[in-house]
Image (tube, grey):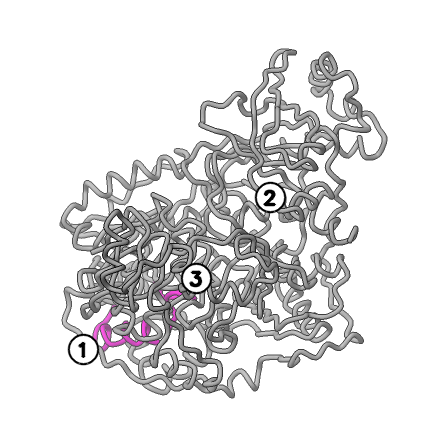
Amino acid sequence: MIQLYDTGAYLLNGTDIVADNQDAAAVLASRLGSAPSREEAAKNTIAYSILKNHNTSGNMEKLKIKFDKLTSHDITFVGIIQTARASGLEKFPVPYVLTNCHNSLCAVGGTINEDDHMFGLSCAKKYGGVYVPPHQAVIHQFAREMLACGGAMILGSDSHTRYGALGTMAMGEGGPELVKQLLSQTYDINMPGVIGIYLDGEPVPGVGPQDVALAIIGAVFGNGYVNNKVMEFVGPGVAKLSADFRIGVDVMTTETTCLSSIWKTDDEIKDFYEIHGRAEDYRELNPGAVAYYDGMVYVNLSEIRPMIAMPFHPSNTYTIDELNANLMDILDDVEKRAAVSLDGAVDFTLKNKVHNGKLYVDQGIIAGCAGGGFENICAAADILKGKFIGCDEFTLSVYPASTPIYMELAKNGRLADLIQSGAVVKTAFCGPCFGAGDTPANNAFSIRHSTRNFPNREGSKLQNGQISSVALMDARSIAATAANKGYLTAATDIDAEFSKPKYFFDKSIYENRVFDSKGVADPSVEIKLGPNIKDWPAMCELPENLILKVVSEIHDPVTTTDELIPSGETSSYRSNPLGLAEFALSRKDPAYVGLAKEVQKAEKAREAGESMTAALPELEPVLAAVKNSYPEVSPENTGVGSTIFAVKPGDGSAREQAASCQKVLGGWANIANSYATKRYRSNLINWGMLPFLIDGEDLPFTNKDYLFVPGIRKAVEEKAAEVPVFAVKDGVLVPFILKLGEMTDDERQIILDGCLINFNRVK
């Protein structure tokens, strides 16, 4: 089904794979008459050409990218614009779309959600942007319909910013990276590796894009095969997939931890642009006659069968047939994983969902940027036509990804088929993907065509003893399960005639409702600031030395951004840095906030010229031990803050709050064995936090230990790769080494200045 190459590979004429082994030169010479070098052939990937066209550095090893367009939603755009305003923003220099698809319901928290929407509308007017009102479209569907462009690059403040199927290289990053673009700065990265995703064959009826995506994720996540690399989709199988199918696979590539994606394009994508009234934005993209990839993933589409990603990660994949055949063994494995993911906080089992040998599901959801596409919903409606979901516990909700899709479903009759089956069809909304909609009952099991199934992504709260769980599936198998009254069923196991209706896009829906400044700013507009919208607190520059208290120690294999700062209803405080920070690590380590704030008292006292030890008496013996070896240490040259350790933090969401909440609580660093994604590490740096690395989990410190980092400012200034650090234990300094990893000159200066806001003020 899926094969990972052990080496790089050459692709000849877009069809033939030649593994980069000892025979490669001879094979290439016999086929081409000569053997091009890896370096030259690597320039023939689609990814290389797009990156080259957007690189401003003149050096393709050290990229400085300027994006063509930007997009954000209502969990992130307030913080981004507030940061940019603090740094002197006068006008959006490129098209910037502000969608309102996350906190759309405005159902809790008083006026704060709609206040943020009105902030967005006033900023779109003042700075020359585009404002998409709530319920019109989820961020990525609007971008596909109205923003994507062949050969372009788009940066979004949402991790699932992926429009590669349409020929657009898109990346999801934390908000500060968008701030840099708004201030006409660059996105600085080393040239990423490019991994070929070679599609062959053709999906069998009943297999959908989520099935293909989950199969790929299951094959590449655990081994990091595509981590921080670009996935380039090529091969004859691409032509066998519709535009919607490609989009559905593409959006899920975020869950591989890749940097971005790009696909070869053809008449199918040309038709997509024509349907949406933007024929001029299509561009045919193909790799060169001989292209070199740093790795190759061979995918036989014909062999893929309906998949399921069991709790609590999209990589925990099985075929549905495999699950049904080995039900109790796999559920036992899920329980073991849950014990790690949930820290034993609640009793978790799915074995009580097994009725007469079949797995019963409580809820089905087809939603958002992954599931809410036109073809997914039409296929689900075809399966459910004339059938009924029953009147027991099982429920089914469907969220079309945009109002134009909703309208077409109404016109072609699929909306009526769904409603008649017992499904509830709702407006465009990202809530089910991040824990703000359709939260199941305690101990309930939900199957979803959405992007993530991390703990709490369905809305349960461990700290209140509440737990439900999510498995990811394709819309087709969700509909098959619904037709079977909630008993898990693969779409390939039922008889269904897929009608594949043609899609008609009604552009007037957006013309009549979306505010588009056409890039014209109006400085006279007054920004609407609701009472929950707060400025960022002042942040000082990096001191000469640091004393850090470890205030959380996490040994899970991977720590998601949702565990660092929960999504769901807590995101209502997204525009209030201190208010949101109260929820940091609340579902993973409830003691974190109190410990961090206690340490922060010492730093606040230091900055006010008051006694640090009076504010934090436990610091006195630590300072005494430090001064025995470093007598020059004083409040004038030594800051105090907190740090956390996690094995591999940062998987999942791009939300900058995962880092900024730690910073506003006095955090100066993270210590990790590695960082799950580039975007989380970038968030740390942009908030002035040191992204330390340490080898192994046999740590020289434990939670609540103090660490002393002498000369840290000098180390950053002098680009030191390693930093000497001391654990303060029983009045003795115990030495060990932390690594800083590679950083650009600007990134080092951001840390020295204390955060990106300070960096831009200095500039």
For badge 3, the amino acid type reads: Lys
Kindly tell me whether residue 448 is visible in this rendering.
yes
Q: Which residue is mark 1?
A: 497
Q: Counting residues from the N terminus, which is met first, the one under dot 1 or under dot 2? A: 1
Check disc 2 and give the amino acid type.
Met
View extreme (front): residue: 33
In whole angstroms, how far apart are the C-alphas of marks 1 and 2? 55 Å
Q: Disc 1 or disc 2, which is closer to the eye?
A: 2
Does the CB distance between marks 2 and 3 fall below 8 Å? no
Residue identified by numbered label 2: 743
Q: Position of residue 683 (x, y in %)?
A: 59, 48
**Mark 1–mark 3 CB contact (< 8 Å):** no
Q: Which mark is residue 43?
A: 3
Look at the image and give the residue range highlighted in magenta. Answer: 365-389
Mark before the other along the chain sequence, 2 or 3 = 3
Q: Is residue 604 magenta?
A: no
Measure how far apart labels 2 and 3 are at the Cα level.
25 Å
Name the amino acid, label 1: Glu
